[in-house]
Amino acid sequence: MSKIKAFVGKHRSLMLTAALVFAIVFPLFGFKKSMVRIFCRILMYFTLAGSLNITNGYSGQTSLGHAGFYCIGAYVMAILTTRFQISFWPVLLLSGIGAAVAGLIISVPTLRLKGIYLSIITLGASEVIRIIALNWEGVTGGSFGIKDIPRPTFFGFTFDSPLKFYYLFLGVAVIFLLISYRLIHSRVGRSWMSIRENELAAKSLGVRTAPAKMMNFAYGAFWAGIIGGIYAVYVQYIDSAVFSLDEGFNIMSMIIIGGQGTLIGPIVGSIVVNGLTELLRPIGVWRFVMYAALIIVMMWFRPQGLMGESNSILAGAKIKMRKAGKTGGKKEAIS
């Protein structure tokens, strides 16, 4: 394993370039539209899960309300493009900003909350956003939703097929990955990780924890809003039912399976969950039982996720148990 990590570390740039080239060329191999739509979902959920991972994995804030920010981005896009005929590209930025502002507002009263208390607050906030979207009929269309959302164009080029949207989702995913990588390896990212490890110790070292946590929350919400905006023009119809609590747990499951606190974990989680969704579609709602079983197995045998480090904080309890077992065995042998 150490040799593999050393090889990856030495040839990281080459491997990333190869992966990007593969992602660009891969859909051109004559796949059906239904398959390309699956690829679009994988990329869409990669950015969604990745943005939640920034909050949960890098600052240790346990948010379950990501579907609410996703909802805000989608409705901002749908309302401004259908009713005010504003171009897609400026509205896309507004979708992210609107979600980021909501994330900032939610983060303020939750600064002193941790664990299950923070999770419940974010879960409730997500449901409040969905209920507002359902009942504010004059603006959101209520249960009828908003339809005929116009397709985006770029210098006369119209995104009107799954393949074209694949490249749009890919472009956003790459931008998200690059910005997040630079941010995580900056002073801001190190302050987030110090809060995750020990907030009290971070304060003693001069980290302004409250602004750092608020920025972290807003940054994750921003990208959820961006994906919500693209999703709205992709399907050309939205209603509040899409952004239910199930969607929030679905996003959460991807980072649990893929690995929190890693940039590559969400893409692995997205591939696994969306792949299972298609494979288990014949069994209907029973596939959710399979998801639950998979998460339980992951939390028991590999709590840090498929791509998480074995010595990460999430695997800490398991490591301690192993060490305790080895120590106990030695003591027994000596006695």
Image (cartoon, rainbow, N blue to C red):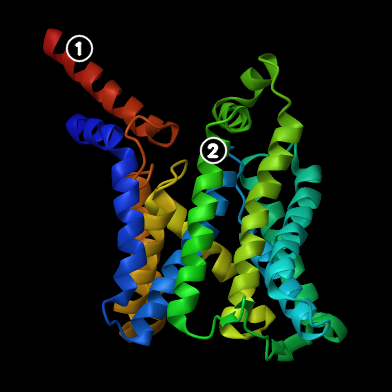
In percent of width and height, residue 12 lies at: 32, 39
Residue 95 sits above or below residue 232 on the image? above
Query: Disc number at residue 331?
Result: 1
Residue appearing at x 35%, y 63% in the figure? 23
Q: Residue at x 26, y 77 (%)?
A: 29
The residue that appears at 40% across and 56% down in the rendered structure is 267
Say what secondary structure mark 1 lies in.
Answer: helix
Which amino acid, by three-letter code, is at mark 1?
A: Lys
Residue 80 point in image, percent of width and height: 79, 77
Q: Badge 1 local density, few (<14 within 10 Å), some, or many (20+)? A: few
Q: Nearer the viewer, residue 195 or 7?
A: 7
Assign a secondary structure to mark 2. Answer: helix
Q: Residue furthest right?
A: 138
Q: Is residue 332 visible?
A: yes
Disc number for residue 182: 2
Residue farthest to the front, as pictured: 155
Q: Quadrant of the N terminus?
A: top left
Q: Vertical placement of 43 versus 196: above or below?
A: below
On the rendered structure, is 332 left or right of 181?
Answer: left
Residue 124 lies, in percent from the top left, at 72, 60
Give the residue at the far top of this rendering. Answer: 334
Q: Percent position (x, y) of residue 261? A: 47, 41
